[in-house]
Structure formats: structure tokens, C-alpha cells
Amino acid sequence: MAFLKIENLTKKFGGLVANSDISIEISQGEIVGIIGPNGAGKSTFFATVSGFYKPDGGAIIFRDEEIGGKPPETICQLGIARTFQIVRPLGLLSVLDNVLVGAFLRNKNRKAALEKAEEILEFTGLKDLRDKLSNSLTIADKKRLELARAMATQPELLMLDEVMAGLTPKETQEAVELIKKINRTGITLFVVEHVMEVIMPISHRIMVLDGGKKIAEGTPEEVANNENVIKAYLGEKYNAASF
Ligand SMILES: Nc1ncnc2c1ncn2[C@@H]1O[C@H](COP(=O)(O)OP(=O)(O)OP(=O)(O)O)[C@@H](O)[C@H]1O
Ligand SMILES: [Mg+2]
């Protein structure tokens, strides 16, 4: 049984084909990076897999079940969670309450949900900020909270959309460590990221999108040396020796 199998996924906005015939299979426990230029269709791919958009074609099969077109809450219940490129905390709630909202998905009584939320705050390094209004957080902590909220739903597959954009090098390094730590707990990850120094070392495999199409898939080394990828996105400055 494939963990996640995506076949010919297509999503259009009017005449614009944002995802065109994308196919990929991923195994449980993998970190799969997704790269590509602005407008390549990375966020659309996440939004379609997680149920925020209905596909116009193709299939999304998660643990032998077709989930394409199911509503986001059903897909989240099945074990797929995502973060948003533009962070969306519930600004007037505390950090703890934001995470608690996610924790209620699998913990129906308040005590159990609270325990799960506290555990996630500890895991993501947000414990000391638990009572702060989420609006008042720095961008790095808002990104961390976005991750914590998704983690609180106890996903098997977590999709991270540019959780490291806008962070300082030190904050980026902390985020990388957190992503590796999440993966060590057995969670499979899809990671969209523009910073090559981040995505190349953490990904087991990378899929490259350009103009809505998959133009390459392989190990970081393979995609970094792929002529089409260099042309479409990387330029000449990256090569296998640089990471
Ligand atoms: N809700 C929408 N309605 C119409 N067009 C959209 C919508 N969302 C995205 N698009 C278009 O679909 C294409 C893919 O956009 P998408 O946001 O998926 O790209 P991306 O790879 O995530 O880019 P970035 O790196 O800038 O985040 C773009 O041409 C974009 O303008
Ligand atoms: Mg995007």
C-alpha cells in the first residue's frame, strides 16, 4: 500500500493551469522537498492535496483511499495537515489557545486536549510564550506557532509552505532542527522552500515544479545537476558540491 500516491493531479483557475498532470508517490517517513520559481504551483499543490481546492483532474490516494475533493476537515481527520505561506494565527487568542484548537481534533475532552497542546508547545519551543497573544509574536514565532497548530492535529503527513521565509540565519537553523525533530517522530513531510541551503540537506527527495508542471524528481544531488532545473530555477550557482 502506497502511503501517498498522486496521479495526474490537475488544478485550473479559469484558463490558468496552476497544476498540470502532476504525479508523485511518497513513502511514510520521507521528507520530500518541493521547489520551483514563483507561481510554479507549489502552494496550489498543497491546497489541492489538503482539500482547500477541488482538483480538476487526477487522483490523490492516501493509504488506499481517494481523498481528492474531500473537504479539508475530513482530510485533516485522516491525518494530513498543512501550514499556510501567509501565517494565519487566530490573532486575538493566546498561543496556547491557538494550539488547543488543533488539539481538539483528536482529543475530545478539554483535559486531554490541554495535555496534547502543552506537549506540542514544549516540542516546538513555544512553552514560554503560551500566554502571549499570538498577534504580538515575532514573525519567527508566528511561523513556529503555525507549525505547532498543524502538529496539534497529530498528522501523519505534514505539509510546510515556506515556514522559513523571512527568518534570520539563526532562526532558519532552529526551524531546520525542528523539522528534522518532527520527522524523527515518524511524521512524513512535504516541504516547500526557496532557500536551497535549507531544502537540499534536509530532503530525501525533491520534486521540481515549473509553470504548473513537474519538471524533475530525484535526490537533491540529481535535481541540482539536472539541466532543466538549472535553467528553470537554480541558475548556475548551485551544484552538487555546494551542499
Ligand atoms: N486562488 C487563485 N485564483 C487564481 N489564480 C491563482 C490562485 N492561486 C494561485 N493562482 C495562480 O496559480 C499559479 C500558481 O500559484 P501558486 O501560489 O501555487 O505558486 P507558488 O509556486 O506557490 O508560488 P510562490 O513561490 O510565489 O509562493 C500562479 O500563476 C498564481 O497566480
Ligand atoms: Mg506559494
Image (spheres, grey):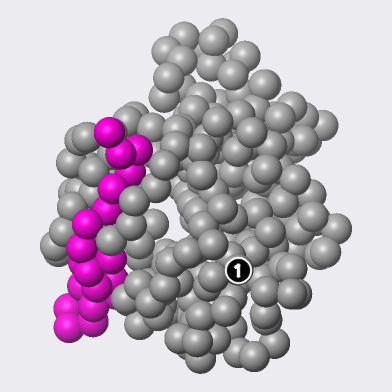
Q: Quadrant of residue 108?
A: top left
Residue nearest the viewer, comparing 158 with 100:
158
Can you say whether 70 is above or below 203 in the image? Answer: above
Residue, disc 1: 221
Q: Which residues are magenta?
A: 1-22
Q: Give me the residue at 28% from left, 71% from top.
A: 19
User: Which quadrant of the figure has residue 61?
Assistant: top left
Q: Give yes or no for residue 2 being in the magenta stretch.
A: yes
Q: Position of residue 138 (x, y in %)?
A: 76, 54
Q: Position of residue 106 (x, y in %)?
A: 43, 19
Taking the image as shown, residue 209 lies to the left or right of residue 206, namely: left
- Give whichever of 159, 6 is nearer the camera: 6
Quarter of the rendering occupied by the C terminus: bottom right
Query: Most extreme residue toward the right, as rendered?
Result: 170
Say whether residue 133 is magenta: no
Q: Main secondary structure of the magenta part?
A: strand
Helix, strand or loop status at disc 1: helix
**147 relative position to 209: left or right:** right
